């Protein structure tokens, strides 16, 4: 925390009003006045709170005056730092994941260029050890309400420059006091103040400023603010003041200088070229005059239009001197904020709402201990002369020791009595427990996440409690994702504006199983015809951010899932399972398994042997194919013969059918004739039989008639 920044502006300027000051001094005075206005407009009060929050995290939770008073009264000042464990749980959740940036082509871009940008961003993050920088910014936000990245180009190691990402001390950064939005794209200005040595100033801004600063300090007057020769803050040493140095010469020697850096937006006229066919726009540098812009537009067959746009001005001052005052080479501010919780211009962290319950817990715990101490050491009532071999003062000193032996005067035993202590108020212990519960309820970090639940709680219940706690913890994590997106957007700007030269991009794809392996790709590769392959400076791209577990956690998850899939019947090669394990020399073991199973890289002898085997198999296949062709020819001939025979059979069948039909017709005609003759004979026979029957019937009637007549006549 920058207490030095707090001391930088607590007093009014000691500069004297003078006439005839230079333009640079006027700018420096204006810069200091604006800085003081931004500082006084809410930043100074936040610095006090942030210092307190930082103390609560590290365990300095008692006010020094209160602590001295308690010590004078013989009362304990207990610190049960639950803020530390609560914040560490959230920090641990963040440490187990890391940022992944991907770019998706949108307008005038391509998938290949998006791939190059993605790999370049991965290489930049790895080179800047971004996971550790991000953890620092995340911790600053949780504890002190605010965290800041600084993303800019660094030309110290290479003339081409490389993007540099670092974490800034939140106390040194003052955001736009008038802003209400999170995104710095909507801010009008941002301040950064830090203490630099003369060597750092000479290396960064030029040696010509060092003599002026030395003269300023030597005179000891005409300074803006009291800390231009002071140093404070979070260093490995204690907070010291240069006035504590032993000699006058040491006091006159500059240790550090307060440097105030302001990035602010200002309107400026620029000239823009527009291509009539594609509509692409190209903004010309500020140094271009209208005449030069018109000539270039005519040469490029483009339209030229003047515009008034917002540009970033970068002004750096040290006390009365201007160190730098130019337009920024960047399109956006280099400072990117992180706010765990944000509500309309009011960012806050997790510790802010834990201070009150933590103070209550400390006070109640101290009171409990005081009551217990008072009960065990309540004091004595001693009648004068009752002690033998011991004075009352000695009894007061050793009266609370274990195994104390008191010798009394004869007959005076009842004259020594222990004072009966007050009973412990009922419910006092429950109050401290409620304070601890309040800390968990406010932060969302429950006992399951703290691993403090007892063994009687089931694993399913623990997992559900962890998931419930993760809902509240997800808010600062989601805020971090938003900041990560801004970092990805800033990296895209730097890569397209400053990294358009041909370069080899090396990256490590450590999400692949096994040990990480470095790979290479080429960006902005110039072709023989002058064209550029993979030109990352062209096109527009969307930024997609995500998070993945760190390598150890990732391997454990993959190993467990691989075993689960194998148990479910999915065929996963053995060497893949070994690569996701934590075995020592796992790559060698996996390679041996691959070779044993025939999946590894083959030696030249193995390749020749396999080629000979393939040749033999090819010959066998050709012989088998020839045999199959012969058999196919025989089969085809037989099929043709069968076809001819099949064509003869229907003709023969047709003739036989005709003969059968003719024979059947003759037989049917003869049968009909026979049936007719039979019918006639039958009719004739029936007629003959009927005629005979009729004759017999007539004879019978005649005989019957004649017989009675004859009898009567005889009588």
Image (cartoon, helix red, strand yellow):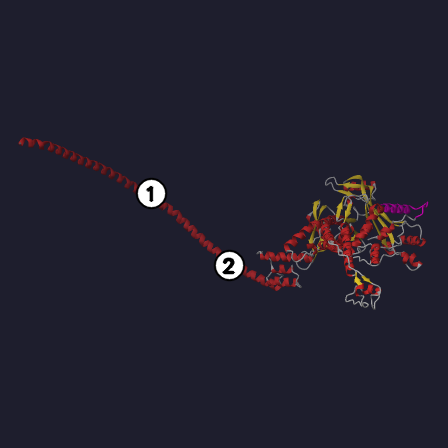
Question: Is 390 displayed left or right of 629 in the figure?
Answer: right
Label 1's element? helix
Q: Residues within 10 Å of mark 1 (few under 14, many from 20)?
A: few
Q: Quadrant of residue 458?
A: bottom right
Q: Residue 158 in magenta?
A: no
In magenta, the rendered stretch is 15-37
In this orientation, which residue lies closer to the viewer: 94 or 82? 82
| Residue 16 visible in image | yes
Find the distance from the CA under tag 2 to the CA under tag 1: 53 Å
- Residue 351 in percent (x, y) is at 76, 51
Label 2's element? helix
Residue wearing tag 2: 623
In this orientation, which residue lies closer to the viewer: 525 or 26? 26
Residue wearing tag 1: 658
Q: Which residue is drawn at 64% across and 63% down?
A: 589
- Residue 544 in percent (x, y) is at 70, 48
Q: How crowded is mark 2: few (under 14 residues within 10 Å), some or many (20 or more)?
A: few
Q: Which residue is drawn at 73% across and 46% down?
A: 538
Q: Which residue lies furthest to the front in this view?
A: 411
Q: How many marks overall?
A: 2
């Amino acid at each position: 925390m920058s207490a030095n920044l707090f001391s930088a502006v607590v007093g009014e300027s000691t500069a004297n009003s003078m006439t005839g000051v230079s333009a640079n001094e006027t700018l420096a005075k204006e810069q200091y006045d604006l800085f003081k206005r931004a500082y006084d407009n809410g930043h100074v009060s936040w610095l006090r709170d942030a210092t307190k929050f930082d103390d609560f995290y590290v365990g300095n939770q008692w006010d020094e005056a209160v602590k001295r008073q308690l010590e004078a009264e013989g009362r304990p000042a207990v610190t049960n730092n639950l803020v530390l464990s609560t914040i560490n749980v959230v920090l641990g959740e963040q440490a187990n994941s890391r940022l992944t940036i991907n770019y998706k082509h949108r307008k005038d871009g391509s998938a290949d260029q998006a791939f190059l940008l993605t790999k370049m961003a991965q290489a930049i993050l790895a080179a800047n050890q971004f996971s550790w920088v991000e953890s620092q910014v995340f911790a600053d936000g949780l504890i002190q309400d605010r965290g800041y990245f600084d993303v800019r180009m660094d030309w110290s190691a290479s003339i081409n420059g490389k993007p540099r990402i670092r974490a800034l001390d939140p106390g040194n950064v003052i955001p736009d006091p008038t802003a209400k939005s999170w995104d710095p794209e909507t801010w009008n200005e941002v301040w950064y103040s830090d203490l630099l040595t003369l060597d750092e100033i000479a290396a960064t801004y030029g040696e010509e400023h060092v003599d002026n600063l030395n003269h300023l300090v030597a005179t000891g007057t005409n300074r803006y603010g009291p800390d231009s020769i002071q140093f404070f803050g979070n260093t490995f040493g204690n907070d010291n003041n240069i006035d504590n140095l032993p000699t006058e010469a040491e006091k006159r020697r500059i240790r550090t200088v307060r440097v105030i850096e302001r990035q602010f937006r200002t309107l400026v006229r620029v000239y823009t070229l527009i291509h009539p066919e594609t509509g692409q726009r190209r903004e010309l540098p500020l140094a271009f005059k209208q005449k030069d812009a018109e000539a270039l537009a005519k040469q490029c067959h483009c339209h030229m239009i003047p515009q008034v746009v917002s540009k970033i001005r970068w002004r750096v001052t040290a006390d009365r001197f201007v160190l730098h005052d130019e337009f920024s080479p960047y399109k956006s501010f280099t400072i990117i904020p992180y706010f765990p919780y944000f509500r309309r211009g009011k960012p806050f962290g997790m510790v802010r709402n834990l201070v009150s319950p933590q103070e209550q817990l400390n006070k109640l715990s101290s009171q409990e201990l005081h009551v217990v101490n008072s009960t065990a050491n309540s004091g004595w009532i001693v009648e004068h002369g009752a002690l033998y071999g011991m004075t009352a003062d000695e009894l007061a000193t050793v009266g609370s020791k274990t195994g104390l032996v008191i010798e009394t005067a004869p007959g005076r035993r009842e004259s020594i009595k222990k004072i009966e202590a007050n009973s412990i108020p009922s419910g006092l212990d429950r109050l401290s427990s409620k304070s601890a519960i309040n800390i968990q309820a406010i932060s969302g970090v429950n006992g399951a996440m703290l691993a403090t639940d007892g063994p009687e709680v089931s694993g399913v219940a623990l997992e559900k409690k962890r998931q419930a706690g993760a809902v509240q913890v997800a808010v600062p994590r989601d805020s971090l994702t938003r900041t990560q997106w801004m970092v990805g957007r800033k990296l895209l700007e730097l890569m397209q504006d400053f990294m358009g030269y041909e370069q080899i991009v090396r990256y490590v794809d450590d999400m692949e199983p096994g040990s990480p392996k470095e790979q290479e790709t080429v960006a902005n590769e110039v072709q023989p015809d002058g064209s550029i392959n993979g030109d990352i400076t062209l096109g527009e791209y969307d930024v997609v951010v995500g998070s993945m577990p760190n390598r150890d956690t990732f391997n454990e998850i993959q190993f467990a899932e691989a075993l689960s899939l194998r148990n479910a019947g999915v065929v996963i090669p053995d060497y893949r399972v070994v690569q996701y394990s934590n075995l020592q020399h796992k790559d060698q073991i996996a390679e041996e398994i691959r070779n044993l199973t025939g999946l590894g890289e083959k030696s030249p002898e193995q390749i020749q042997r396999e080629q000979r085997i393939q040749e033999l198999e090819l010959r066998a296949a050709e012989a088998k194919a020839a045999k199959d062709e012969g058999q196919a020819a025989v089969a085809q001939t037989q099929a043709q013969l069968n076809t001819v025979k099949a064509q003869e059979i229907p003709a023969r069948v047709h003739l036989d059918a005709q003969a059968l039909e003719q024979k059947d017709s003759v037989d049917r005609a003869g049968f009909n004739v026979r049936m007719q003759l039979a019918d006639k004979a039958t009719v004739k026979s029936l007629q003959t039989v009927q005629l005979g029957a009729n004759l017999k019937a007539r004879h019978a009637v005649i005989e019957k008639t004649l017989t009675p007549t004859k009898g009567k006549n005889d009588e």
